[in-house]
Image (cartoon, rainbow, N blue to C red):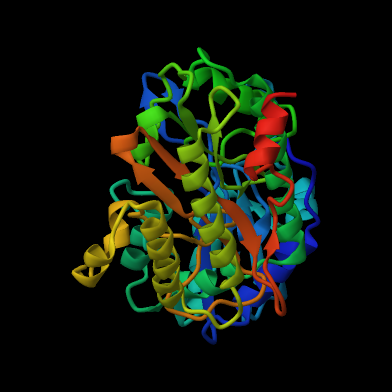
């Protein structure tokens, strides 16, 4: 892995917190992701399942974590199963975790090779009453592809139909949404790498460069700072492309007078950052572009102040809508009649700001967190308002990642990334 080793006490604590909420005499199983095929012998780069990583620190395919806190055999209360390594694998694929190295990474003492999984599971299931299965219940989840976790769950429930079944996901949704100080440090590292990429791009952009060239500048800076790359597919959207919310072609020329919307974030140790900036191709915002830009920035700054413990996500978005309505009125994009006659289910401001303002951040870019429960300290959220004006040929979105504090304003993990008009123009013209 490119990232520096992570203190195993994070994963020890995460497991302890999870096991404290398991049902009596139950076990829970977590699987690595598959390496997904493309065609012939080609595969996608491996991405670890975030849940097993969160609970063990293991960042390797064909790994299984089993937790059984009430097991009569003390050595079987935490177990790892790993793909057995050998000299042949070391030559062709590189180093894999040994049992000793797995303990150093995870803090788990009992490590088996994967070939022993079925035998050990049979013993554990005979000693337990309940099994916690791990299903993906994120509100944005795509479930079209059957995962290794899904296949294992299907096999387990068929082989042991007499066991009671509980879900791991609600426990993980709550635990993963509140970040440990070690996690906050990893998120800050991801944001710092994103900052380096952004400062590089500000010095690079000029009329005539291509969107993909800007993408290349980001990835160069990310890789040289121990990131494995983008935390999500980057959006490099110049001119009217910015009005396509998930524009990812990144293949157009950047023209003099246009703006470029950059929705880009580096990952670090599987933790995501998520930044958006909108910059002028020629280094200077026009008067109109500056008016809209500053309106978006005001909404972002005022929305950020609302992210405090006890806030309900849905109520927060309604309040942000009021902020945006006021700005759009001042910009002349909507009028009082539009507001008076608006559909409550699709307010007038939605014509120019049609997406949400904030989502949880962490191991996933759209991270775990139950949106109907009050916000808590050490949750990390994006703040990303935007105004999109196809008829004027540009769209503007600004986005930072912030940590909710027990008292006071949220901590902005991206406070050092240039965002004010004057700072951006100064750097681009220096």
Q: Is residue 407 left or right of residue 315?
A: right
Q: Residue furthest bottom?
A: 24
The image quadrant of residue 130 is bottom left
Residue at the image position 73 percent from the left and 27 percent from the top: 224
Residue 115 position (above or below residue 73): above
The quarter of the image holding the N terminus is top right
Counting from the top left corner in percent of width and height, residue 17 is at 65, 76
Q: Is residue 28 left or right of residue 430?
A: left
The image quadrant of residue 220 is top right
Residue at the image position 79 percent from the left and 64 percent from the top: 9
- Residue 12 showing in the rendered view: yes
Residue 59 position (above or below residue 26): above
Residue 377 position (above or below residue 417): below
The image quadrant of residue 250 is top left
- Residue 197 showing in the rendered view: no
Counting from the top left corner in percent of width and height, residue 264 is at 55, 38
The quarter of the image holding the C terminus is top right
Q: Nearer the viewer, residue 328 or 163?
A: 328
Residue at the image position 71 percent from the left and 52 percent from the top: 415
Counting from the top left corner in percent of width and height, residue 140 is at 37, 57
Residue 352 position (above or below residue 259): below
Counting from the top left corner in percent of width and height, residue 378 is at 67, 70
Q: Nearer the viewer, residue 145 or 411?
A: 411
Residue at the image position 30 percent from the left and 58 percent from the top: 350
Q: Is residue 302 left or right of residue 14?
A: left
């Amino acid at each position: 892995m490119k990232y520096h080793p992570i203190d195993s006490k994070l994963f020890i604590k995460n497991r302890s917190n999870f096991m404290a909420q398991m049902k009596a005499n139950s076990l829970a199983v977590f699987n690595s992701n598959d390496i997904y095929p493309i065609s012939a012998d080609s595969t996608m780069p491996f991405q670890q399942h975030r849940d097993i990583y969160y609970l063990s620190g293991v960042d390797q395919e064909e790994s299984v974590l089993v937790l059984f806190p009430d097991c009569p055999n003390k050595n079987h209360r935490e177990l790892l199963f790993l793909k057995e390594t050998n000299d042949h694998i070391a030559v062709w694929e590189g180093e894999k975790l040994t049992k000793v190295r797995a303990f150093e990474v995870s803090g788990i003492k009992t490590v088996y090779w994967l070939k022993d999984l079925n035998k050990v599971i049979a013993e554990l299931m005979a000693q337990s009453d309940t099994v916690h299965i791990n299903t993906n219940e994120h509100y944005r989840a795509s479930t079209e592809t059957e995962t290794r976790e899904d296949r294992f769950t299907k096999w387990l429930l068929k082989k042991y139909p007499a066991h009671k079944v509980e879900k791991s996901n609600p426990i993980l949704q709550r635990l993963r949404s509140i970040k440990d100080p070690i996690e906050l440090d990893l998120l800050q590292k991801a944001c710092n790498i994103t900052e380096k990429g952004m400062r590089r791009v500000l010095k690079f952009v000029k009329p005539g460069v291509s969107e993909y060239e800007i993408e290349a500048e980001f990835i160069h800076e990310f890789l040289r700072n121990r990131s494995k790359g983008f935390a999500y597919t980057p959006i490099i959207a110049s001119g009217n492309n910015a009005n396509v919310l998930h524009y990812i072609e990144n293949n157009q020329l950047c023209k003099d007078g246009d703006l470029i919307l950059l929705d880009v974030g580096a990952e670090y140790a599987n933790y995501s950052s998520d930044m958006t900036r909108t910059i002028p191709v020629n280094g200077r915002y026009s008067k109109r572009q500056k008016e809209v830009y500053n309106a978006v920035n005001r909404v972002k700054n005022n929305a950020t102040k609302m992210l405090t413990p006890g806030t309900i996500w849905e109520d927060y978005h309604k309040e942000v809508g009021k902020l945006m309505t006021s700005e759009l009125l001042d910009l002349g994009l909507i009028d009082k009649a539009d507001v008076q006659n608006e559909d409550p289910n699709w307010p007038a401001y939605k014509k120019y700001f049609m997406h949400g303002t904030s989502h949880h951040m962490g191991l996933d870019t759209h991270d775990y967190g139950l949106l109907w429960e009050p916000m808590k300290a050490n949750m990390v959220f994006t703040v990303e308002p935007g105004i999109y004006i196809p008829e004027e040929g540009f769209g503007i979105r600004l986005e930072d990642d912030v940590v909710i504090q027990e008292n006071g304003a949220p901590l902005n993990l991206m406070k050092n990334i240039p965002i004010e008009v004057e700072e951006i123009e100064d750097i681009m013209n220096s």
